[in-house]
Image (spheres, coloured by chain):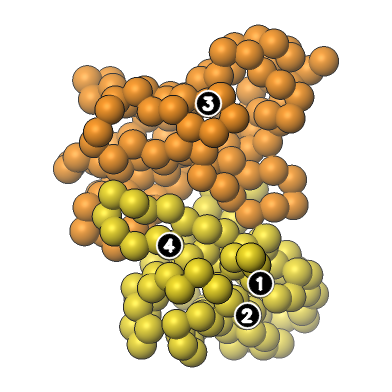
Chain colours: A orange, B yellow
Amino acid sequence: AQSVTQLGSHVSVSEGALVLLRCNYSSSVPPYLFWYVQYPNQGLQLLLKYTSAATLVKGINGFEAEFKKSETSFHLTKPSAHMSDAAEYFCAVSVKGSQGNLIFGKGTKLSVKP
Amino acid sequence: NAGVTQTPKFQVLKTGQSMTLQCAQDMNHNSMYWYRQDPGMGLRLIYYSASEGTTDKGEVPNGYNVSRLNKREFSLRLESAAPSQTSVYFCASRTGGVTNEKLFFGSGTQLSVL
């Protein structure tokens, strides 16, 4: 069975500081990994995805994530936080043949201080 | 381009009442999903439909039924609402292809069961 664990339900950074949101996965087969973002009172939007091509994946709004098989991790980073990055971020996993059924982590709420 | 449209946006029910949440997508996607989101729990899959005419249970199907009325529409029904079903419900549809997986979410229905 697949699962994801997001470390830290709430992360707070200052504007301009590095953003690091942690995600570890568990999967018995090569996984597909995703990061989604949810702004207040909205549905989720795809930030980026890893589907076994390049291990460093670039997404929208300056975010990127690196797939590290040895660490079973897929952490999300952004070099410089902006106030507009304040949102909740979800890591998710699926596997080939799962018909796209995603297993979501519990989410990390990012706050950005001026 | 409407994407995924959910109705209603808000609903308050009394225990034992029934209701149907409506979802429609205009992107010609085969797969559609219903998730519920609870604080600290992330998103959990209730039911999904891989194609018109098929539906399958997800992680938390008890107390719910679904209908894939046609390719565009996928409804979620609560036959006898319970306070434990108080949640935010999201409908989603998915692009085709294993490596092109991307979920498009509606804006959600906030349901309170008293």
Element at badge 3? loop
Q: Nearer the viewer, residue B65 or B63?
A: B65
Task: Kindly identify the residue that appears in the image at 38 percent across and 83 percent down.
Answer: B52
Kind of element beneath mark 2 = strand
Instruction: Compute the Cα span from label 1 to label 2.
Output: 6 Å
Amino acid type for the residue under numbered disc 3 = Phe
* Labelled pair 1, 2 in contact (Cβ < 8 Å): yes
Who's the residue at 71% across and 21% down the image? Answer: A82
Q: Residues within 10 Å of mark 1 (few under 14, many from 20)?
A: many
Type of amino acid at the residue the image marks with label 1: Gln
Residue annotated with mark 3: A63
Q: Chain of mark 1?
A: B
Camera-nearest label, 1 or 4:
4
The reply to whether the C-beta atoms of the residues labelled 1 and 4 are less than 8 Å apart is no
Residue corresponding to mark 1: B6
Q: In the image, are marks 2 and 3 on the same chain?
A: no
Amino acid type, mark 2: Gln
Quarter of the picture holding the N terminus of chain B = bottom right
- Label 4: few (<14), some or many (≥20) within 10 Å? many
Of residues A15 and B41, the one drawn nearer to the viewer in this rendering: A15
Residue B68's place in the image compared with B37, above or below, is below
Q: Secondary structure at mark 1?
A: strand
Residue A45 appears in the picture as rendered: yes
| Left or right position of A6 against A51 | right
Q: What chain is tagged by disc 2?
A: B
Q: Provide the residue designation for mark 4.
A: B94
